[in-house]
Amino acid sequence: MALANRYRRRIVTFSTELEGLIPSYGDLISITHDMPHWGSGGEILSKNDMTLTLSEPVEFTEGQNHYLALRTRTGSLSGPYRVTAGSLPNEVVLQDTPDIEIETGTTSERTHFAFGTQDKWGTLARVTGIKPRSGKVEITATIEDSRVHTN
């Protein structure tokens, strides 16, 4: 409890659509946001073999490995998978085959991604509140810190 009080001090609140009803109180979720450098995110528009076209351009940093984490149909996390730069700013090339089917069509929701370096593609947070708000869902979470679990 003392370590949780010391290291779990950052609280975030955000709104999402009805998929915000998927997590439960206490669930560990992944959050991507470019302002605090928690990676970047968007949708996968198309897939050609191992090359993915993304809805947003992504930036590669020289000398670092970059990863793409994918959201499954059930809202869980698949990956992260190592990627390299494609020929366009919004293209990446997967180095390994993902364990999910990547949705790019219009008959279902496209697969969402989180992109960044090894430890900066997203941050983990523990859900502390879920409030439905007329078609939207407001989620409150506390940023997880691994130091809480050390001896």
Image (tube, grey):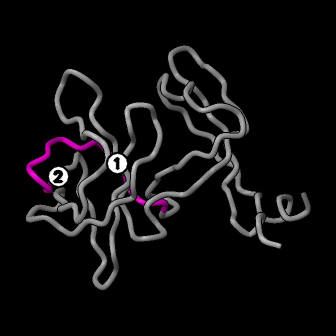
Marks 1/2 in contact by CB < 8 Å: the verdict is yes
Task: Give 16 or 105, whichever is nearer the viewer.
Answer: 105
Q: Secondary structure at mark 2?
A: strand
> Residue at the spot x=59%, y=54% of the render?
124
Q: Position of residue 50 (x, y in %)?
A: 14, 56
Q: Position of residue 141 (x, y in %)?
A: 67, 44
Task: Give 43 or 94, whichever is nearer the viewer.
Answer: 94
The circle on residue 69 is none
> Residue at the spot x=25%, y=51% of the render?
56
Residue on which the image places disc 2: 52
Q: Which residues are magenta?
A: 38-53
Q: Position of residue 135 (x, y in %)?
A: 50, 16
Q: Secondary structure at mark 1?
A: strand
Residue on which the image places disc 1: 113
Main SS category, magenta section? strand
On whether residue 43 falls in the magenta region, the answer is: yes
Q: Is residue 122 left or right of residue 45?
A: right
Q: Is residue 94 left or right of residue 38?
A: left
Q: Position of residue 87 (x, y in %)?
A: 8, 65
The answer to whether residue 112 is above or below residue 149 is above
Q: Mark 1 or mark 2, which has the lower sequence index?
A: 2
CA neighbours of label 2 inside 10 A, class few (<14), some (14 to 19), many (20+) = many
